Image (cartoon, coloured by chain):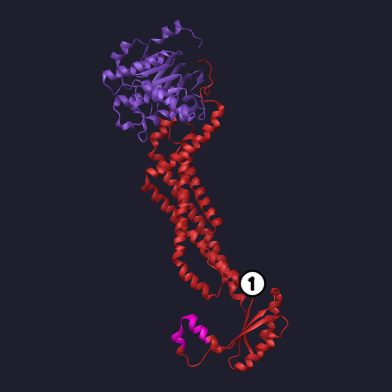
Amino acid sequence: MIEFHNVTKRYEGGYEALTNVSLQLADGKMAFITGHSGAGKSTLLKIIALIEKPTRGQALLNRINLNTVSRHRIPYIRRNIGVIFQDHQLLFDRPVFDNVALPLQIQGYRPQEVAKRTRAALDKVGLLHKEKSMPITLSGGEQQRVGIARAVVHKPMLLLADEPTGNLDPVLSREIMQIFVEFNQVGVTVLVASHDLGLIDELDKPRLTLNRGQLILNDLVDDAAETDDGW
Amino acid sequence: MAGSNVKRRGPATTNRISAYLLHHLQSLIFSLGKIYQAPATTIMTVAVIGITLSLPGGFYLFLKNIDAMSGDFRSSSQISLYLDLGLSEKRAREVEKDIAGMDQVDSTRFISRDQSLEEFRQNSGFGKSIDTLSSNPLPHTIIVEPIEADTFAIRNLLNALQAMPEVEIAKLDTEWLERLYTIIEIAKRSVTIITILFACAVLLIIGNTIRLDIQNRYQEIIVTKLIGATDAFIRRPFLYGGVWYGLLGGIISWLIVEIGYLAISGPLERLNLLYQSEMTLITFSFHDFIILITSSTLLGLAGSWIAVARHLNQIEPS
């Protein structure tokens, strides 16, 4: 699903966020990206989500070269990805239902279909009873769950989460991570950036550890050798 | 999961077209909802557009009336004969009879010196000043209505009448009309220039409003881009917003012109009477109304298009 070959990302001004990062994440896998803040976790996710382009090296998503993808195709590629942000990025001018329904409306689903899938996604994160509420009236954990519902409502192949538990207490964090594990169990590839090491240890999933832009630990290397799925 | 067809997860194609139309409808209603939610901004923008468009609209209507009034005279090409001041009324009436007998003359009308003075006293507003005059300065006048003929024949008649010794001045009444037409022509071109300038102003007003709208919804644009919205999808509500501004502004400008028309219709009616014209005053026809509304709506669309083209592409998630 995701392949990085010696990817380097240097921002304007010379700051190097990623240095020679190579990795492979197979279909249906779940992995964590860990590291201190500023280690390059977000940059890695941004390259996959087509927000940033690599300065050097090659990044592939589903065999599509992310370095050279045309502007016109970006929206269609993004429709295969669900992104979850630390700060939820909900739209506060409309109720929960409309927030979650947005990806489906963008992709042109029929209203009946939109309603059905939106309610299913809200049910999955346990917020079906809040569909008419405005996001501002929800707690931090609830807002994050709305963000997750929006990210998965269109059944993406890949789920990216950038510090999804950053602002939540341990109990809520565990709940959120459990939701990701459940999605992974039904075949969605999941990549979560987090520095909540205690929680990651509990979940026993492969880790990618970044330090100042360099990949210093890659649990996926052994993994990839075991599961040769035709990449 | 293998394969790189990134579009495969979308809904079926048959649904796509209806979904496309549906999103247009949704954008239309959504942008109307946005307008409704921010009434103060909307009212101000729409009022500015309305006032701006009412100026060329009002000028246009004014000209249309003047044009119609002057058109009323166009068919008549009367010749006014101002007779020698020393001529007695009896002699003057004989001259009238002679002229009435001429081939090219359809009819004549005699206005005596006293009648002229009386008419002048009533209509000019100089009644009191006229009373101070020791003698009547106005001559006997004969209005000659030529039979229907071309300009050349009428010119010949004019020259023949001018040549008569009793006639001091022979004046073709179309002369002042021609001057009027020239003035109207100048005014028409001025209205065209004003219309173009004010249309540009409306374009800028709507462009600026939409630009602010884009800035206010920066976050929403970022988020929708991140979850796979195409540029066209993001553009649509803003374009419809511009359409609404233009449409509402057009209606406001129409109302302003109609109210203004009502306010000045009294004196205008009197002016009409003074010109002894039978015509009624004209206001916007349905055709004019449609043109006004359509052009203001198109201006709204164009203004928002400019703003969207300039500003929307600059917003990218980072």
**Most common secondary structure along the magenta stretch:** helix
Image coords of residue B318 (percent x, y): 40, 29
The reply, left or right, for residue B74 in relation to residue A190 is right
What stretch of residues is rendered in magenta? Answer: B117-130
Instruction: Tell me if residue B241 comes above or below residue B185 in the rendering.
Output: above
The reply, left or right, for residue B38 in relation to residue A71 is left
The reply, left or right, for residue B145 in relation to residue A206 is right
Instruction: Tell me if residue A193 comes above or below residue B143 in the rendering.
Output: above
Image coords of residue B67 (percent x, y): 57, 67
Q: Is residue B121 magenta?
A: yes
Q: Is residue B204 magenta?
A: no
Disc 1: CA contacts within 10 A as few (<14), some (14-19) or many (>=20): few
Image coords of residue B20 (percent x, y): 52, 33
Image coords of residue A224 (percent x, y): 44, 8
Chain A colour as displayed: purple
Q: Is residue A15 visible?
A: no
Amino acid type at circle 1 is: Ser
The chain containing the residue under callout 1 comes to B
Instruction: Identify which residue is drawn at 45% across, 51% down.
Output: B249
Q: Which chain is red?
A: B
Please tell me whether mark 1 sits on a helix, a strand or a loop.
loop
**Residue A174, quarter of picture:** top left
Instruction: Identify which residue is drawn at 45% across, 24% down.
Output: A154
**Residue A150, quarter of picture:** top left
Instruction: Tell me if residue A118 comes above or below residue B35 in the rendering.
Output: above
**Residue B132, quarter of picture:** bottom left
Which residue is label 1 attached to? B75
